[in-house]
Image (cartoon, helix red, strand yellow):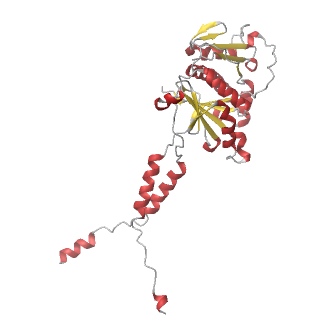
Amino acid sequence: MGKFQKKRGKSTPKVSTASLPDIIFMLLFFFMVVTVLRDSELKVENNVPYATELTKLEKKSLVNYMFIGKPVKNYQAQYGTKPALQLGDKFADISEIPLFLEKHRSTVPEGQRPGINTSMKVDGDVTMGFVTDVKTKLRKSGQLKLNYSAKKRPN
Amino acid sequence: MAKNVRTAPEVNAGSMADIAFLLLIFFLVTTTIDVDKGVLVKLPPWSDEPPEDLKLNKRNVYSVLVNADNQLLVRGEPQQVSTLKNNAKEFIMNPSKRSDMSEAPNKAIISLKNDRGTSYKTYLEVYNELKAAYNELREEEAQRKYGKAFEYLDKERQREIRARIPLVISEAEPTNFGEE
């Protein structure tokens, strides 16, 4: 009996886990805030080239994305193998760019609109003809800030 | 009286952590923290009138042509992408005051022209090299004048250096060659 009591006296007190949910919640909120759910499935091949002079696009809400590349296998029967433009989650014609820009524009508060950037994610194998057509359309729509998306060149 | 004594039964919050864990793991899996990076350019505004013919001194123009076979022609001579940056730097600064290179850094103009059949990869590579040339020149200027890296200078000084070595890349309409 005496031995029993001695042992009990020495045992370390239990750590309270009551605050565990709070810690987890904190982590949860962190990840919820930094998460960007991928809203568009890629329907074109998109292997952006390498570059060294890169600028980070900080504010995601001020960026609209355009994907240019060859349609992936599943869509080749329907859309052919020529370079195609994907706006949002569907294939689009170059003439639909102004509307797409306007739609994105309306989601941005008025004061921040001059900072809107277009990020062009262009597959490296695409020829410049199509890219130039898109660029011309952007210029005509008054969207002059452009970002050629690229990967950092490994040394 | 009896009402006062009755208290709401306490909800067991023990499984709260599990629920939070579940959500946490979901967001952990779906998160992509990688930021979009790229080469930032500013397009010239569109105008319906054809651009007026600027009389430019030939020595100030660094013409770069990229053809449909992704070959480079720089000032009339074939060149490799790997040497483009250093040649452009020399042209812009013209340290040996040669009469066939730019009069001053702020007068130098890079003229970039490509075919419709040029691959985007090559185009971006060339653009990147030209931009790198300017960035390196600004960096060198910042080091020489202020002994500090360009990005750590204050806004005023950055603007000053940018004005001295302005990035002017003029892009001509591509020629219709080699489109698929």
At 72% from the left and 29% from the top, the residue drawn is: A139
Left or right of residue A145, residue B15 in this image: left
- Whole-percent x and y of residue A123? 54, 27
Left or right of residue A92, residue B62 in this image: right
- Whole-percent x and y of residue B42? 69, 29
- Whole-percent x and y of residue B100? 72, 7
Instruction: Answer whether residue B27 is visible to the viewer in this image.
Output: yes
Quarter holding residue B85: top right
Nearest the camera: A145 or A52? Answer: A145
Nearest the camera: A41 or B88? Answer: A41
At 53% from the left and 22% from the top, the residue drawn is: A125
Nearest the camera: B56 or A117? Answer: A117
Residue furthest out toward the front: A78
In the rendered image, the vertical position of residue B54 relative to residue A134, given as above or below = above
Quarter holding residue B169: top right
Quarter holding residue B87: top right
At 43% from the left and 78% from the top, the residue drawn is: B9
Task: State which quarter of the image contains the C terminus of chain B.
Answer: top right
In the rendered image, the vertical position of residue B9 relative to residue A128, given as above or below = below
- Whole-percent x and y of residue B18? 40, 60
At 48% from the left and 46% from the top, the residue drawn is: B31
Left or right of residue A17, residue B109 in this image: right
